[in-house]
Amino acid sequence: MKIPQMITAELRRLTSTRMSVIALIALLAVPILYGGLYLWANQDPYGNLSSVPVALVVNDQGAEVNGAERNLGDEAADQLLDSDTFEWHRVSTEQADQGLQRGDFDFVVTLPSDFTDAVASLSSDSPRQADIELRTNDANNYLASTIGTQAVARIQASVAQKVVDEAGLTLLDALHTIRVQLVDATTGATQLVDGLGTAKNGSSQLVSGSTQLADGSAQLADGTAQLSAGAAQLKDGTAQLRDGSARVADGAQQVAGGVDRIDAAARQVGSIAGDAAAQLPQARSDIAKALTDAGLDKARVNEILSRLDPVGDRLQSANTRVQDTVAQINQLDDGARQVASGSATVAAGAASAADGASALADGAASAASGASQLRDGSAQLRDGATQLDDGIGQLSTGATQLRDGLAAGVDQIPDSDDATRQAQAAAISDPVAVGTSSVTKAQNYGAGLAPFFAALAGWIGIYALFLIVKPVSKRAITALRSPIRVTLAGWLTPAGLGALQMVGLFTVLAIALQFSFANPWAALGILLFASATYAAIVLALNVWLGSVGQFLGLVLMVLQLVTAGGTFPWQTLPAPLAALHHVLPMGYVVDAMRQVMYGGDLTRVGPDLLVLGAWMVGGVLLAAIGVTRMTHHRTLRDLQPSLIG
């Protein structure tokens, strides 16, 4: 009997009755129903979260935030109610508890009474985190806890973004104000530096002047000390002068009195002498007349007169001398009077000079004392001016550093307008934009699970077929037909039926569920190749172990269900199961399907197919060896069928 004949005989057996046909069709539909319905149900669960009922309890009492009364709980509630993330229901705490217990709500989100106050505390001396309470009930749905945690995280991010956006804008506005003030301060500091430069020049001049003043005041102190000593001597001298001039004035007054008396006598003598001299011509005439009357001749008279003329001349000369002497005595009297008057004046002046000298001595002493104080004060002024100059120099250096620091601060604070600050605040509140890019990308959640469930559905389909398909033809074995042919016929029959299952499943995935395939024909080919591989494995188990082998096929399916890495990465598996991932065939089917379905690395498909081919060839060879053994040996199982199959 040839291979096609054995396949045809098995197919006729499977379709011999109406119930057989129904059973065959039902088993052929198992993978289609399993894979199609499961993937349909999970095609896009995250896109349907808006149908998940969630209770929202807002107990927030509000608080002052950034100078304004706010209720962030109400604001967050309004935002959530307007969104389509979940089917939100704003209820009271009692209603939420009852609904969560009855299953009306999958989870409850509560914003406590101090929610806004806690957010506002971030700018206080006692900051604390704002709480968002999440309550779940795993009796309703275990995944609701995970979904609820994600929902709370989104609420937290939304509130944080809103608060940070507003706070960031306030901060940026404050920084802008600070920048403006820093610019003003920089201008003021520049003016201060310029003013201090002028002050430094002035202080330097002050140091120079105060040094000169100190030197001059020291000289002045020495000079006033000498002046004081001289004034003291002058005081003593003028006192002596006053006393002496007083005595001189008294003597001069006495001299003037004596001279007055002499002048009076001289005036009398002069008057007499003048009278005598004035009477000489008359006396000569009288003598001449008397002589003439006496009878003397003229000659004799002239002789006698000639003898008397020398006496008259001498008398006239004496009168001249007397008059000169009287004039001199008059002058002496005038001089004596002047001397007396002058000496009196001198005496009065000497007395005034003595008084002035005394006052001068006192003033000189005061001047000396003041000059000494001036010397000490000017020295202090010089030292203070020097310190002032040094201080102004340090102040100028500090002011320059202040100006440069303020200017550097101004440069570090950007000069932004309102629109820029609003954009900056928005960026601060949401500083990281996650840019996602994928080497390959599944169409949706269902498409992401399709490789795994298609591979699993293929195994389930083959396993189900072997419930009604005979692994090998017992008639052919009894007739000692070729073990290879019997084996190939026993393999190709479920492999062909499995191919129909895979075509039907692929049609549902591509058309009914509209999953996109980057390489559709390659995907269909891998499903067919995987189904044929599964058929070889289950065939070998049935040939060698019969019903036990069929059960082991179920065990292998369960093992591959957890080790294929269809949902979570296989690296998360315990070490023994992770080791099985590298051995069992379903993981390679999943990997190959992902590459051809999503447009991944097609070079990875080759090694996957080699592993599947090794399983296929190994399964067929083991089955052939088992068939060969069956043609030569009989066991009790061959003669008496197992109770379980």
Image (cartoon, helix red, strand yellow):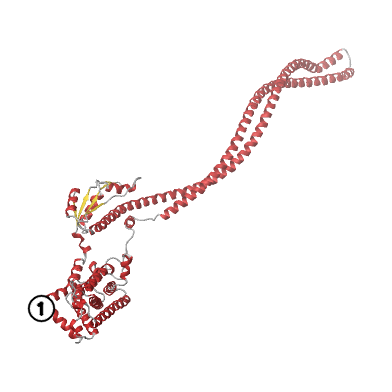
Q: Nearer the viewer, residue 323 or 546?
A: 546
Residue farthest to the front, as pictured? 636
Q: Nearer the viewer, residue 559 or 294?
A: 559
Could you say which quadrant of the image residue 386 lies in?
Answer: top right
Q: Would residue 342 be seen by someone viewing this image from the given angle?
A: no
Q: How many marks?
A: 1
Image quarter in which the C terminus is found: bottom left
Which percent across, then down, holds residue 208?
Answer: 59, 43
Image quarter in which the N terminus is found: bottom left
Residue 142 versus residue 36 in the image, above or below: above
Left or right: 472, with 225 as reference point: left
Which residue in the structure is indicated by mark 1? 17
Q: What amino acid type should be assigned to the residue bearing mark 1?
A: Thr
Residue 468 versus residue 272 in the image, above or below: below
Residue farthest to the left, as pictured? 18
Which percent across, then down, holds residue 629?
Answer: 25, 81
Indicate the secondary structure of the residue bearing disc 1: loop
Residue 554 versus residue 171 in the image, above or below: below
Left or right: 360, with 267 as reference point: left
Q: Nearer the viewer, residue 71 or 60?
A: 60
Residue 104 versus residue 621 in the image, above or below: above
Q: Residues within 10 Å of mark 1 (few under 14, many from 20)?
A: few
Which percent across, then down, holds residue 185?
Answer: 43, 48
